[in-house]
Image (tube, helix red, strand yellow):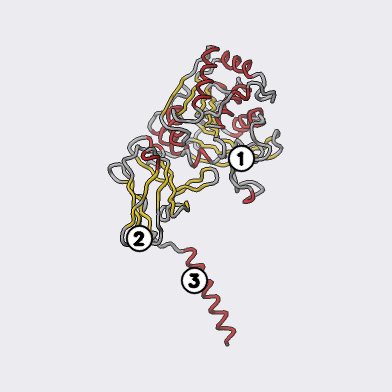
Amino acid sequence: MKKILVILLAMSCLMAFAQQNTSYREGDIQSPVVNADGTVTFIVNAPKAKNVEVRGDWEALNGVGKMKKDKKGIWTYTTPALPSEMYTYRICIDGVYGLDPTNPFVRRDVGTQFSVFFIGGGAGDFYQVQDVPHGSMSQVWYKSKAAGTQRRLSIYTPAGYAESSERYPVLYLLHGSGGDETAWVELGNVARIMDNMIAKGLVRPMMVVMPNGNFSVPAAPGETPDNLAFRPVMSNKIPGNYKNGNYEMAFDEIVNYTDHHYRTIAERKYRAVAGLSMGGFHTLFIALNHPDLFNYVALMSAGLGNQYLKDETPAYAHYMEKLHTLKEKEPALFWIGIGREDFLYQANADFRKTLDEIGMRYEYHESSRGHLWCNWRQYLLILTEKLWK
């Protein structure tokens, strides 16, 4: 009998533990609270903490908010009024960074999780779900002969794709260092942007294909045969991956896969390629090595520099000759966007000088701030309105 009681007690403890793991107690605290005037209030229950701060990606006060504690141990902080955007942030408690405990909405950027919130009334409206027709986002695998393995793509198809026989133009959209085929989906809010822009009649319905630009791995961390052993890092830390030209040279595999498996308009006139940071570098050299594929080319805070001018790697060799060839192809749009505080600002200014010297037409957009997703999302809003005109 004694043994039976012990077993029953152990089982009841396990059941209680399981129930505790699966339960959710909301409590009275809600954080963050987006106020009517565009300010945002954060609330954290940490009675034993000595110092609590909010660290976010907004411009005001460099995104740092020092919280104040009341007699009950509740810390609060309210930002200045913030422009319409999607914002990411973390809470720092006595030097330890983590998520906002009562905010269930998060995004991963490289290897760090951030809490998120939105402020509407402008660009931020396009990043949120609206009551409009919705397209579909899929993760699909293609066989890469060049890589010798299957590789994963994220593909957006517009509302009505499954029911119609219509063919669509395609935007190939590339991520930066530390990103993968999920970066533009999660941090760029591509599906929401396209749904809302299409519904408002601002852009033509199109497909968006987002490849994994880390050519030595097949997919995002956690989605490869290495499973959880492959953890997210900056792209130059992945063995055999960084700036060897393999991705750029083999990019036609992705275009061919898309044209064969989806109802695309398989013509240069209806293809665009764009990318941010490392993806901007990729975009340039994809366009240079495949000048017959793309009629629209867009560099967002592109990771450029003079180091590739003398590089004999096939993808980067004969740089000026390839640039002249691209100029002669007269793309409908060659677009460059960068923030005034971006650490790549001068490299992009030097590149524009080169384009001026050879007489190549381009459009230039200069924004405020630096190397941030708030810029890249807004660049996408600007760019998509210029496509297929």
Q: CA distance from mark 2 to mark 3?
A: 29 Å
Type of amino acid under label 1: Arg
Position of residue 382 relative to residue 65, above or below, is above
- Tell me the residue that label 2 is attached to: 73
- Residue 48: x %, y % from top left: 40, 62
Q: Amino acid at mark 3?
A: Ala
Sequence order check: which comes first, mark 2 or mark 1? 2
Residue 217 versus residue 15 in the image, above or below: above
Element at badge 3?
Answer: helix
Could you classify mark 3 by the number of other residues whose Cα lies within 10 Å: few (under 14), some (14-19), or many (20 or more)? few
Residue underneath mark 1: 152
Give the labeled residue for mark 3: 16
Q: Residue at x 63, y 29 (%)?
A: 248
Report the amino acid beneath label 2.
Gly
- Give the structural element (helix, strand or loop) at label 2: loop
The answer, for residue 249, to whether it is visible in the render is yes
Residue that appears at 71% across and 37% down = 148
Q: Residue 200 placed where, x, y %?
A: 38, 32
Q: Could you classify mark 1 by the number of other residues whose Cα lies within 10 Å: few (under 14), some (14-19), or many (20 or more)? A: many
Q: Secondary structure at mark 1?
A: strand
- Which mark is nearer the camera, 3 or 1? 3
Residue 30, percent across and down?
A: 35, 55
Decide which of tag 3 and tag 1 comes sooner along the chain. Answer: 3
Frontmost residue, 3 versus 231: 231
Q: Residue furthest left?
A: 37
Estimate the x, y position of residue 329 in percent, counting from the top left.
57, 15
Q: In the figure, residue 47 lies in which quadrant?
A: bottom left
Q: CA distance from mark 2 to mark 1?
A: 47 Å
Can you say whether 340 is above or below 156 in the image? above
Dot placed on the residue nearer the N-terminal end, 2 or 3: 3
